[in-house]
Image (cartoon, rainbow, N blue to C red):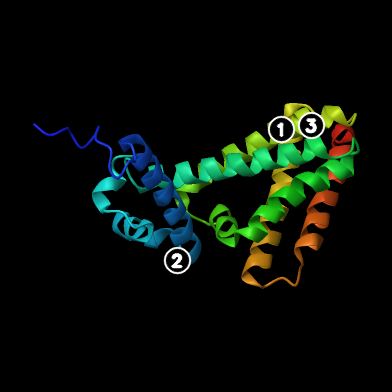
Amino acid sequence: MSEPEATRAYRGVAPADRRAERRTRLQNAVIDVVADEGWSAATVRKVAATAGVGPRFFYESFTDMTDLVTTAYDELGATLLERAVHAIAAAPDELHAKARAAVGAIVGAVERNPQQGRFLISDAPPLAERKSAFIRSAADELAKQSDAVGTRLDSRQAELCAVVVMAGAVELVRGWLDGTLDIRPDELTEIVASTLSTLTAHMPTIGR
């Protein structure tokens, strides 16, 4: 009896590594399809073809298209947030400097890969809940980082601040990427960073 396909190496690559590679290719593919053609075009067959894998391999990693698109969103969002946190850590201990570093890290990533930006701001229905979760994650990080510059925000204040800043940032990024706004990446970074730092500084006094 031959060794089962599930445990047999192919061209020196272990099965687990092949599965991981296909999973990554499918995630990259759904980002491209949604960014270029919208959620309605994101079918299993379309995404699998874009990834260069057979449709049957889709189901070894994902239950359905919603599972794939939300996983891709969560992992991409976590990566961008991690980049922002690293940039904050390297920035001077001053509110605007840290805000600019965080925003600049994200804008820079989108500038290098506009498809990811288009995917993140897409109107795909399955992403609505995930966007709210991302804002909460950003708010949690904002609450932690605000302590470092002497502007303590509680969880409620941080969430309100994150909602305002994210809403404006999304529309600026949308206009930048589709060409409807005459704005450069450095201008976008400065506008969002200024909004974030100003609102963070004033939020503790709002509602008191």
Using the rendered image of the protein, determine whether residue 72 is visible from the camera's viewpoint: yes
CA distance separating discs 1 and 2: 33 Å
Q: Which residue is mark 3?
A: 145
- Label 1 SS: helix
Instruction: Find out whether the residues at labels 1 and 3 contact each other: C-beta distance under 8 Å.
Output: yes
**In the rendered view, would you say 59 is above or below 151?**
below
**In the rendered view, would you say 63 is above or below 109?**
above
Instruction: Find out whether the residues at labels 2 and 3 contact each other: C-beta distance under 8 Å.
Output: no
Nearest to the observer: residue 82 or residue 193: 82
Q: Which residue is mark 2?
A: 37
Q: Which residue is mark 1?
A: 141
In this rendering, would 37 be left or right of 122? left
CA distance separating discs 1 and 3: 6 Å
Q: Residue furthest toward the left?
A: 1
Q: Residue furthest toward the front?
A: 12
Alpha-carbon neighbours of circle 2 within 10 Å: few (<14), some, or many (≥20)? few
